[in-house]
């Protein structure tokens, strides 16, 4: 497996009222293409911060981030934006849909920044929507007319419509009840099966089970790592127990 | 009281939160205050100024000016018997239209009076210099000369006319009242008699009417009476000036300027309206949660809306306070200028009350709009507020679905944004239209009126010869012309006249005729419609004349010249910014009115390589001996021949002055030598540089136009900048979340800035077109006054495009705050 993402001595520092807070400290990490990597850790351990640095949302304070062979840590904001549109998809806890656009337009706003408007694109969007269970009756609706789970699935379609090399997710089920959360996770699993690289931050063991690699973060450093077989290829209870054991060991 | 305190604190917090917008609004209110208070104050002030000047100086209000040939004592007798006239008097003045001040190139409009005449015309209590009574050549000038010429007591002033020079010492300044002939200068009786030999004398009758008398109607019957008392066949020199018309002439420019300033104030008021509306609507939407919190805390919605009103009153109040002093100063400047135009040099104070009232008006206006807009708070009870208003407009049909759009995504998104905020755009559109109107009109004026060469060559309305000679009429003008034409320096000579006035029957305006043998040989008289006269029954007028007299090409008009009336066909209308009441006729045409007409003026056009002033010296030395000077001079010369020539000249000059001899020559033989000469050396009466003189006038005119149009354009640009930057700031704040999401999707800041600023493009384009259309309409109105100004349409198009680009540029830079939005912060919020 080749590394699609690699960090070298990654540091991220925030200054609060003159106080320096080192959130990520000299972190060396490599994430393989095709993996479903889950980042876990206590609240405030720097998970989100790491995710944003990896995905080119934010610039590291020191160190490097390589995306494939590209060193994105020295990019300007606009270069990062261009980079993101080509390579990254995002799904977040809060539902970041554009309130003033309907479902289709929300997705197309993401798609058209990179692609031309072709019938092929439109039919792909529609089939993706069908794939995540958003029926045609919802396509012309606005975000505030949809449930949270539906919104999140629309968000996922928007994130993958440009076929990003990596799909990033920060607690995608955090705001959902368990059944709609499962529906969203099923989408992730099926994307992963189709070969999509995914990096996801979560608090939730049930969510973490979907991955095949778990990285545990404490005070901005990787303190442990755990590998699992592909989701669905083993018994869920035993998978859950061994992950629980790993997390306990990490002091979760 | 406690409650008010609470609300004020709330308002101040709001101002602090939106520092930049509050600052910009404050500036806008300041500009508006300056413009409005100065224009209102000066319009009121200028309106009251002339009556108060009349009162203060005790001058007459109405005037009739006649040549000596018309005036007789009977003219006064008529007045004494007429009950319409409450008081009257008669004074003589002498004038030289070519008079210049020695160090300036401009002709000065100065008329000279004896103190006995001046004292009867108004209160004459000059401030005098010490030892005024012992000065050799004292001159008392009207006190506006202090301002306009920078003169002070005891200064030497020298006036020139042709080669003659007159020097005086400023003995005093007096406040001049209403007067139709420029500045008054009071000189000693001796100097007066001397000047009289070289200048034209006019008789002026000043009069006040009983209440309710129609001055112009009276003047008409008075003219008939006065002309009836003389046997001379007089045609021209009767001019009447009614009080109201005089005031209008003197105050027209400054009133016009105040009016333009008032229009600009209107634009800024509009801008303020638009801005406050945007700000409040945007703010309420954005602050919906805090409003909910406040309401949950027990604030009444009325109190919250009051906090908006107070917020804008504070901001506007500061702007108004900052603006009022410059406003009053500007008003004083305008009024002082108007007074100087009217040759009044006394103290001028801008009225403060109108200035304060207009400021009050602005504040009331702000109160009103902020109050009506802030009432929207009521629509949001706490629960609704917490739910972010649960806006309904998203349930409407989708505008411009992206699925259907084939154009560039950024433009599609911009257009979507445009239609979603269509209502906001109306205000912006009106502002941009107003600004386009201002800028395009300014450009048109600068382009046509501010351009000296264009003015001179195309719309001056008169021939601009390099040298114009007024002949003494001693030799046939035609022979003189041929003689001049034979000189190698001269390329063209035209014969004309500039003292023949006609009237159109039943209209009261005397018109100066431009008479040429053949208009095809003229260069600067250019028609905007029709053609110039060719036959003897044809006449042309100015474009303004067309509107004033309501004529069309092909109309037949009855032309009055003295007691003679003849019909002429109107062939066309001439551009003429210099003299709106001019007529154009061929020599043969004019001979139908005056069979004895002979031209007395020669327009000399020189070879481009010849210097006009050195050639003029040649002409003057050859033909320019002054008859009046010679006749009153003494025999001079060192040699016998010189003395003989001098004596002969004196004899000839005396014969001409006293006996009306028109040509003489002499031949004297002394010791076999023949000394001969003729009156040919006295052919030139006056010599002027037509082209250079007009260029001077046009230069002044052009620079005034330039200043006015530049300042208008700057104000317009500032207003656009402020409005667009506030609009952008507001939209960005409103769409903070959306913009963050878009950034997350990989849109760059530049793309988003482009989208945001491109939203204004449709509205700006429509508004600019409307503004341009209105500019052409307004230009049409201006052309009625000034004559056809050929505006270059492509150039206007370029200007409009520049306005649009500027709007886009302002919007784009105003949207640069998008750069500061960090996706990251938004995601972690
Ligand atoms: N923009 C910022 N400025 C200052 N400090 C920040 C900023 N963003 C994050 N931090 C700090 O960095 C630390 C890590 O934050 P981060 O959001 O990465 O944690 P997390 O692991 O995602 O926590 P959670 O599980 O609660 O989401 C926190 O202590 C936080 O206060
Ligand atoms: Mg987090």
Image (cartoon, coloured by chain):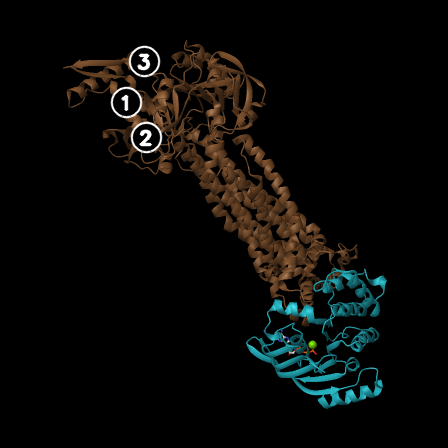
Chain colours: A cyan, B brown
Quarter of image, ligand 2: bottom right
Q: Earlier in the sequence, mark 1 or mark 2?
A: 2
The reply to whether discs 3 and 1 touch (Cβ–Cβ < 8 Å) is no
Q: Chain of mark 2?
A: B
Nearer to us of marks 1 and 2 is 2
Residue beneath the point at 68% across and 68% down? A85
The reply to whether discs 1 and 2 touch (Cβ–Cβ < 8 Å) is no
Q: Quadrant of residue A71?
A: bottom right
Q: Which mark is residue B568?
A: none
Q: Nearer the viewer, residue B556 or B432?
A: B556
For residue B361, say whether it is visible.
no
Same-chain check, marks 2 and 3? yes
Q: Position of residue B487 (x, y in %)?
A: 34, 26
Q: Which mark is residue B662?
A: 3
Q: Nearer the viewer, residue B584 or B7?
A: B584
Residue at which label 2 appears: B615
Same-chain check, marks 1 and 2? yes
């Amino acid at each position: 497996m080749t590394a699609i993402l690699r960090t070298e001595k990654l540091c991220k520092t925030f200054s609060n009222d003159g106080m320096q807070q080192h959130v990520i400290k000299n972190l060396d990490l490599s994430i393989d293409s095709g993996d479903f990597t889950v980042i876990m850790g206590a609240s405030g351990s720097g998970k989100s911060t790491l995710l944003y640095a990896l995905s080119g949302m934010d610039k590291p304070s020191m160190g490097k981030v390589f995306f494939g062979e590209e060193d994105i840590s020295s990019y300007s904001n606009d270069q990062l934006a261009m980079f993101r549109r080509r390579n990254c998809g995002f799904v977040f806890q809060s539902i970041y849909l554009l309130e003033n656009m309907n479902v289709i337009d929300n997705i197309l706003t993401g798609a058209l920044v990179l692609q031309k408007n072709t019938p092929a694109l439109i039919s792909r969007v529609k089939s993706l929507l069908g794939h995540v269970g958003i029926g045609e009756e919802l396509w012309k609706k606005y975000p505030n007319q949809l449930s949270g789970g539906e919104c999140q699935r629309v968000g996922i379609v928007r994130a993958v419509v440009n076929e990003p090399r990596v799909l990033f997710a920060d607690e995608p089920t955090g705001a959902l009840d368990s059944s709609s959360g499962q529906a969203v996770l099923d989408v992730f699993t099926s994307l992963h099966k189709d070969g999509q690289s995914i990096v996801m931050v979560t608090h939730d063991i049930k969510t973490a089970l979907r991955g095949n690699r778990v990285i545990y973060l404490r005070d901005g450093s990787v303190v442990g790592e755990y590998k699992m077989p592909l989701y669905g290829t083993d018994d869920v209870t035993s998978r859950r127990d061994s992950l629980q054991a790993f997390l306990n060991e990490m002091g979760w | 009281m406690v409650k008010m305190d609470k609300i004020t604190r709330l308002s101040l917090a709001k101002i602090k939160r939106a520092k930049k917008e509050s600052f910009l609004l404050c500036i806008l209110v300041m500009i508006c205050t300056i413009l409005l208070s100065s224009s209102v104050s000066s319009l009121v002030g200028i309106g009251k100024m002339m009556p108060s000047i009349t009162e203060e100086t005790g001058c007459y209000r109405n005037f009739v000016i006649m040549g000596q040939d018309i005036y007789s004592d009977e003219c006064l007798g008529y007045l004494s018997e007429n009950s319409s006239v409450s008081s009257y008097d008669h004074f003589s003045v002498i004038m030289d239209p070519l008079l210049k001040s020695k160090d300036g190139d401009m002709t000065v409009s100065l008329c000279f009076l004896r103190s006995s005449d001046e004292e009867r015309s108004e209160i004459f209590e000059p401030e005098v210099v010490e030892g005024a009574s012992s000065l050799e050549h004292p001159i008392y000038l009207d006190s506006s000369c202090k301002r306009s010429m920078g003169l002070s007591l005891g200064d030497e002033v020298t006036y020139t006319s042709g080669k003659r020079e007159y020097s005086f010492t400023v003995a005093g300044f007096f406040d001049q009242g209403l007067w139709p002939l420029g500045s008054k200068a009071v000189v000693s009786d001796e100097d007066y008699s001397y000047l009289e030999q070289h200048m034209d004398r006019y008789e002026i009758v000043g009069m006040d009417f009983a209440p309710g008398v129609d001055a112009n109607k009276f003047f008409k019957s008075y003219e008939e009476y006065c002309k009836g008392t003389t046997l001379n066949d007089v045609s021209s020199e009767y001019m009447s000036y009614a009080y109201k018309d005089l005031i209008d002439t003197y105050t027209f420019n400054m009133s016009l300027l105040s009016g333009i300033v008032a229009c600009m104030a209107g634009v800024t008021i509009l801008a303020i309206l638009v801005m406050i509306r945007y700000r409040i609507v945007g703010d309420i939407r954005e602050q919906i949660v805090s409003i909910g919190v406040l309401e949950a805390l027990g604030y009444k919605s009325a109190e919250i809306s009051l906090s908006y009103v107070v917020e804008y009153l504070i901001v506007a109040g500061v702007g108004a306070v900052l603006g009022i002093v410059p406003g009053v100063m500007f008003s004083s400047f305008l009024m002082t200028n108007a007074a100087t135009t009217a040759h009044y040099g006394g103290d001028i104070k801008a009225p403060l009350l109108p200035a304060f009232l207009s400021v009050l008006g602005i504040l009331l206006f702000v109160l009103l709009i902020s109050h009506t807009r802030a009432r929207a708070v009521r629509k949001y009870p706490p629960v609704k507020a917490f739910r972010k208003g649960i806006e309904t407009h998203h349930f409407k049909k989708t505008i411009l679905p992206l699925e259907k759009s084939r154009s560039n995504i950024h433009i599609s998104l911009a257009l979507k944004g445009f239609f979603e905020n269509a209502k906001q755009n109306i205000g912006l559109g009106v502002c941009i239209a107003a600004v386009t109107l201002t800028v395009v009109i300014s450009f048109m004026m600068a382009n046509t009126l501010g351009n000296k060469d264009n003015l001179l060559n195309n719309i001056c309305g008169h021939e601009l010869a390099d040298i114009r000679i007024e002949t003494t009429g001693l030799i046939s003008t035609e022979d003189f012309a041929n003689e001049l034409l034979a000189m190698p320096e001269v390329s063209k000579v035209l014969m004309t006249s500039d003292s023949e006035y006609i009237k159109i029957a039943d209209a009261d305006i005397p018109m100066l005729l431009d008479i040429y043998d053949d208009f095809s040989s003229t260069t600067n008289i250019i028609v905007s419609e029709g053609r110039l006269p060719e036959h003897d029954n044809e006449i042309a007028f100015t474009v303004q004349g067309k509107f004033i007299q309501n004529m069309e090409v092909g109309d037949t008009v009855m032309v009055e010249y003295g007691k003679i009336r003849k019909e002429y066909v109107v062939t066309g209308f001439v551009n003429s910014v210099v003299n709106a009441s001019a007529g154009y006729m061929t020599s043969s045409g004019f001979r139908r009115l005056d069979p004895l007409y002979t031209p007395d003026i020669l327009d000399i056009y020189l070879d481009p390589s010849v210097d006009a002033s050195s050639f003029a010296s040649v002409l003057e030395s050859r033909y320019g001996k002054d008859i009046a000077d010679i006749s009153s001079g003494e025999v001079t010369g060192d040699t016998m021949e010189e003395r003989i020539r001098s004596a002969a000249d004196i004899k000839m000059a005396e014969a001409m002055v006293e006996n009306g001899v028109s040509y003489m020559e002499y031949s004297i033989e002394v010791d076999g030598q023949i000394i001969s000469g003729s009156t040919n050396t006295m052919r030139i009466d006056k010599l002027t540089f037509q082209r250079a003189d007009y260029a001077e006038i046009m230069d002044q005119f052009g620079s005034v136009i330039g200043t006015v149009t530049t300042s208008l354009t700057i104000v317009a640009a500032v207003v656009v900048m402020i409005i667009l930057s506030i609009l952008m700031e507001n939209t960005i704040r409103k769409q903070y979340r959306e913009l963050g999401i878009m950034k997350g999707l990989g849109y760059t800041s530049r793309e988003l800035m482009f989208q945001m600023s491109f939203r204004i493009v449709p509205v700006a384009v429509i508004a600019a077109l409307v503004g341009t259309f209105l500019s052409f309409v307004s230009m049409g109105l201006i052309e009625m006054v000034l004559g056809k100004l050929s505006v270059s349409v492509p150039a206007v198009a370029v200007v409009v495009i520049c306005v649009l680009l500027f709007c886009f540029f302002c919007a784009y830079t105003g949207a640069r705050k998008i750069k500061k939005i960090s996706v990251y912060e938004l995601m972690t919020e």
